[in-house]
Image (cartoon, rainbow, N blue to C red):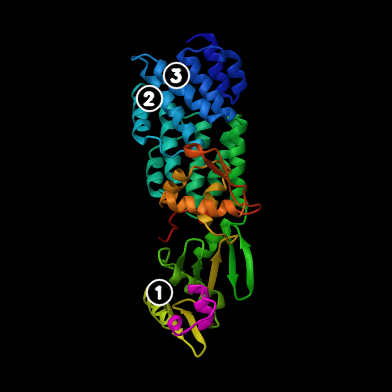
Amino acid sequence: MDSLIAAAGRALAAGDPLGALNRVALRDDAPALALRGIAMAQLGDLDRAKELLRRAAKGFGPREVVARARCIVAEAEISLAARDLTWSEKMLDAARMTLESHGDRANAAHAGYLAIRRLLLTGSLSDAERRLAVLDPKPFPASLRTAHELIVAGIAMRRVQARAARAALKRAKEAAQEAAIPTLSAEVENVAFVLNAPAARLITRDGERPLRLDDVELLLASQKFVVDACRCVVRHPHKGVSLATRPVLFALARALGEAWPDDVSRDELVARAFRAKHADESHRARLRVEMGRLRAALQGLADVSATKQGFVLRPVRTSEIVVLAPPVEEDHAAVLAFLFDGESWSSSALALALGTSQRSVQRALDELARSGKVQAVGHGRARRWLSPPLPGFAPILLLPAFLPSD
């Protein structure tokens, strides 16, 4: 390795991409191309960065397997930053094993963290936790320790474990200060903002108020009966019933929960569940059927009783019902929650992260674009979608994941 390559590598490790480019910008050999690609990625030109790294990987000889593996890892990191979730996990895993077998433990661990971050983005929390458990961050550089703790914090936030998330975030901040890389410190601050912003609203008979993630954690651990409109789950102190695939039943449960301890008229229930302006006999007959289904779904948790005017919800073994609602009620809230991170997403990546069809995501994006909530950049396969963040709110509970009691 010549002195310019070594100096450029040190500059990149310190978060100085311009300093690295000053040393290798005019060189086209494989090591210089790789460093130029990483520098362009740090400067935000992700497409150019990918092109340079691919050229570098092709330029390394058959014996330079470690260098080629590092290029694959760097390209996977760029794809993750660009929210391109279609990159090959097998290639990344093969590169990780190559690096590990040649003693490059730091870059092998970095590859492992990239795979875990992809799992976190797609809501595969159990798999992410399992892979994270085998990685010990202590012997690694401060930058990797920061990445480790940010992943720990991200998993804890998705699990609604605010105390664990704050502890991990504190460790991440200390490691980022040790690394002295401004972009890492900025990433830690962004996560801290999300953790401290209102994550939900609590609706009770006395009104409503915003809740931070810490408050949501305490609420879910309490003895209250919670109708969770963030995840479409009805929660008893020791059990939860998901109604995410049964929107009519959840709409009825939410209406009854918001009115508790009073009943809700049949006309209002028809309007909430079926979106009908005027209730006729067919609507009333359907309402009776759906109420029977709701009663069966909530068996052991609550009783749905008919009254003279309509229906009332009475919980079992608890004395209070509350509704946990999103901080802002939006159509296609899950799509907006992913776009909240400020990165540009393709419709295919959003579909993969949401576990739904690309066509459904495209329809949602078109509706959001017509209302000015998102905007498209580029055309065809290069099209990406952006959305300005909702000021003062954190959509962490709108991302797909299972909560602790699930």
* Direction from residue 123 to residue 26 in the image, left or right: right
Q: Which residue is mark 2?
A: 99
Furthest toward the right, the residue is: 391
Q: Nearer the viewer, mark 3 or mark 2?
A: 3
- What secondary structure is found at the residue carrying circle 3? helix
Q: Which residue is mark 3?
A: 56
| Visible residue check, residue 299 | no
| Visible residue check, residue 345 | yes
Examine the image and state in which quarter residue 246 appears. Answer: bottom left
Question: How many numbered marks appear?
Answer: 3
Q: CA distance from mark 3 to mark 1?
A: 59 Å
Residue 309 image point, x, y percent? 52, 88
Q: Mainly helix, strand or loop, the magenta region?
A: helix
Q: Is residue 402 magenta?
A: no
Rendered view: 238 above or below 311: above
Q: Which residue is mark 1?
A: 298
